[in-house]
Amino acid sequence: MYAISYSQELFHGPTFAFKDVALQMLGNFFEYFLSTGSNGGRLAVLGATSGDTGSAAIYGLRGKKGVDCIILYPTGRVSEIQERQMTTVPDDNIHCVSVDGTFDDCQDIVKASFNDKEFRDTVKLGAVNSINWCRVLAQTTYYFWSYLRVTDNEKDVEKVNFSVPTGNFGDILAGYYSKRMGLPVGDLIVATNENDILHRFFSQGTYHREDIQETISPSMDICVSSNFERYLYHLAGNDATTLASWMGAFESTGKLTITGKKLDEARADFKSAKADTANTLETIQQYHTKYDYMLCPHSAVGVSAIHQLNMVNSATVCLATAHFAKFGDACSMAVNPLPTIPKELARLWKLQIRSSNCPNDVKVVQAFMQRRVEERMNNHKKRDEKKQLVKRLVVVSAAVGVVAMVVSAIRRR
């Protein structure tokens, strides 16, 4: 193995994952627009996570005025440290819910809730997953930034390739839009684990749904990629009717097959590769042994992909999407002992956990969400009334004090 020329570390935010880049911005946007009276001044965000989105969303939305944040995650299918990052946040506008099912089940609940107009309007529903356009928009920034850094260092490079470990297609979709905006992007490499529906599409033209396999890179354990529908719209020639036909067939049969010129068009923008658990662990071990560089099991999938495609060169950037310490159990299968983990992650085991559990049922989750939002609003209303009462008492006390001083002064005369 040879070392990659560039690894873009996107995990230096509060939750040590690339999603901090977008969600720190999104949280501030939400709070600003709500403060202007938009959406009645309040928003109930419902999100699904396979690991990283949840904690990044929580840290981006915690304490934000007018915002409730409800995060669904599959019971037992996120790493322990990811779960602790979500469930140890004490802010009362944060609600973590483990769902008895897979990430796709959680994602289906979110989609169904957005399609339920009555529920959506009642709770003033908002999105935080990458189905939120702001997420994709924010992620375009690091494609531009890294292109400029690479071409500063490599004067003979005209186009930069990007290898992106992906499950939900949001991160690499930002790269695709960057290219459409004019950034000189070469190949966008779709790197998948055993849940390889995207690799099968770009290599064979078959977007066929299969059961999710549980892997050591859980944030990519997704069998239906939400953002892929956005790309298919462009592949359909920006024709909503064609897209609706494709997605209707997929929803009813679990299969979508593209051949001929359309598949050639897709391959002109994207290459793909699959790294299974053995490939991933080997990549982690090799890079640590030879270069003293630790990869998380997601980033390692992206690195493995460029080796498989013979694209290890000075024009290729691998997106490093998370800190290895978030997946200590997986990484220790390749490197033991592990390097020291950040103190911010080490302290999570000393904090109290706060979480709820729901069955894989849309109505049950909606009822839970509505109840929690109403409880918090009532608590805040009582708190505000108490504050107003205290203020009035202070004013009255001050007035009484002034009157007493005046009366005392008159008597002294």
Image (cartoon, grey):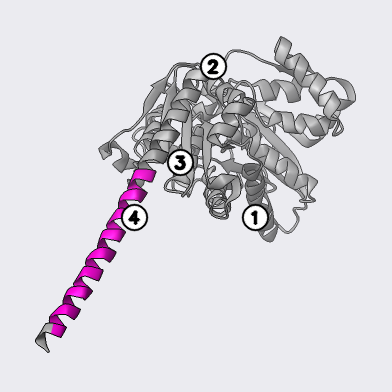
Residue under label 3, please give it.
Answer: 58
Compare marks 1 and 3 and give the one earlier in the sequence.
3
Nearest-to-viewer mark from 2 and 4: 4
Helix, strand or loop for disc 4 = helix
Residue range corresponding to the magenta coloring: 381-410
- The residue beneath circle 4 is 388
Label 2: state its secondary structure.
loop
Q: Earlier in the sequence, mark 2 or mark 3?
A: 3
How far, Cα to Cα, is label 2 from label 1?
A: 34 Å
Q: Nearer the viewer, mark 3 or mark 4?
A: 4
Measured along the vertical axis of the image, is residue 168 above or below residue 150?
above
Between marks 2 and 3 in the image, the one whose residue lies nearer the viewer? 3
3D distance between C-alphas at marks 2 and 4: 55 Å
**What label does residue 145 carry, if any?**
1
Circle nearer the viewer, 4 or 1: 4
Dot 3 or dot 4, earlier in sequence: 3
